[in-house]
Image: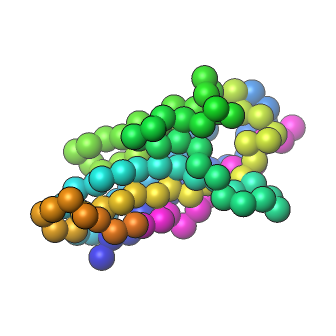
Amino acid sequence: QVQLVESGGGLVEPGGSLRLSCAASGTVFGINDMAWYRQPPGKERELVASITSGVAGSVEGRFTISRDYAKNIMYLQMDNLKPEDTAVYYCYMNVAVVAGPFGFDYWGQGTQVTVSS
């Protein structure tokens, strides 16, 4: 079994910064893809950033995605936050639990980010 545990959300004023973390634990042979999604209130879930494709246009220049290969941890550094960034943020990983090219999709539990003065 694989679990993704998120941390780092909270309340921040406009212009502030937060760093989200997502740690994978369990039987992790390899990680094929990592990404952050968010779901604003009343809206559908959207892709924010991916290790393979970079960040979405709406957050370009403000958000940075990175990973610690040794610890199986993914980060999302969020700077110059705006009220429209308010959402529940979810991490996603495609994890291989045995040798080979195929993996399974896993999601974190979600963490609330609220940008408000």
Q: Is residue 108 left or right of residue 114?
A: left
Residue 78 showing in the rendered view: no
Identify the residue at horizontal 47%, vertical 43% (top origin): 50
Residue 60 forms part of the magenta stretch: no
Question: Residue lying farthest bottom?
Answer: 1
Region rendered in magenta: 106-117
State which quadrant residue 109 falls in: bottom right
Identify the residue at horizontal 81%, vertical 40% (top origin): 83
Q: Quadrant of the C terminus?
A: top right
Residue 4 showing in the rendered view: yes
Name the image colouring.
Answer: rainbow
Residue 115 forms part of the magenta stretch: yes
Identify the residue at horizontal 26%, vertical 43% (top origin): 69
Q: Which one is in front, 92 or 68? A: 92
Identify the residue at horizontal 45%, vertical 38% (top origin): 53
Q: Which one is in front, 90 or 104? A: 104
Q: Which one is in front, 50 or 7? A: 50
Residue 37, relative to residue 1: is it above or below? above
Question: Residue lying farthest left?
Answer: 99
The image shows residue 73 at horizontal and vertical percentages of 36, 49
Q: Is residue 1 left or right of residue 81?
A: left
